């Protein structure tokens, strides 16, 4: 069963959305409670908690998406490298092939 945050963010299917919301809620709890314990002002602490939620959620969102993009780039490079390894294995273009002295004199 899918859960949509604000009606458009599908938390189940969008990468990093679930973790961002969870870390954002934890951040808002910590910041809001810390502000309340320091100042004893309820309304201002709720405002600070909402700000903490937004900042923590967006911060983790960008961090997670950046790492996801890096991981996808590494996977693409590895996939292409494996394809090239299979394609060039055993040919003169194979970078792993070691040429000995007798092979160098033959060519």
Image (cartoon, rainbow, N blue to C red):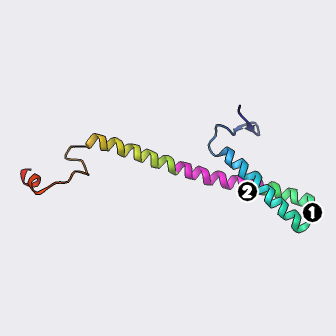
Furthest residue toward top: 1
Q: Residue at coordinates 88% horizontally, 63% vertically from top-left?
A: 36
Residue 25 is covered by the magenta coloring:
no
- Cα separation, mark 2 vs mark 1, equals 21 Å
Q: How many labels does the image show?
A: 2
In the image, farthest residue toward the bottom: 38
The image quadrant where one finds the N terminus is top right
Residue 102 vs residue 89: left or right?
left
Graded by Cα atoms within 10 Å as few (under 14), some (14 to 19) or many (20 or more), the crowding at tag 1 reads few
User: Do the residues bearing badges 2 and 1 touch, measured as CB atoms within 8 Å?
Assistant: no
User: Looking at the image, which residue is at 61% across and 51% down?
Assistant: 64
Instruction: Please state the horizontal and vertical placement of residue 19, each as a whole percent of the image.
Output: 67, 48
> Which one is in front, 4 or 18?
18
Horizontally, residue 68 falls left or right of residue 40, namely left
Residue with the mark numbered 2: 55
Q: Where does the image place residue 20, in percent across and percent down from the top left?
A: 69, 49
Q: In this rendering, is residue 82 above or below 33?
A: above
Q: Where is residue 68 in the image (x, y as percent from the top left)?
A: 55, 48
Where does residue 80 sit, x and y in percent of width and height? 38, 43
Question: Magenta segment, which residues?
Answer: 53-69
| Residue identifier under label 1 | 41
Q: Which residue is drawn at 21% across and 43% down?
A: 90
Of label 2 and label 1, which has the lower sequence position?
1
SS assignment for the magenta stretch, majority:
helix
Left/right of residue 58 with respect to residue 97 in the rendered view: right
Which element is circle 2 on? helix
Q: Residue at x 45, y 46 (%)?
A: 75
Number of other residues with Cα within 10 Å of mark 2, as a class: few under 14, some 14 to 19, many 20 or more: some
Q: Is mark 1 on a helix, strand or loop?
A: loop
């Amino acid at each position: 069963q899918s859960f949509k945050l604000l009606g458009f963010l599908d938390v189940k299917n969008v990468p990093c959305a679930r973790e961002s919301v969870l870390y954002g809620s934890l951040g808002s709890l910590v910041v809001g409670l810390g502000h309340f314990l320091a100042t004893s002002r309820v309304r201002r602490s709720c405002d600070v908690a909402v700000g903490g939620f937004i900042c923590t959620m967006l911060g983790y969102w960008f961090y997670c998406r950046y790492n996801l993009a890096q991981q996808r780039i590494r996977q693409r490079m590895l996939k292409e490298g494996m394809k090239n390894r299979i394609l060039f294995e055993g040919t003169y273009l194979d970078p792993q092939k070691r040429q000995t002295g007798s092979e160098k004199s033959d060519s």
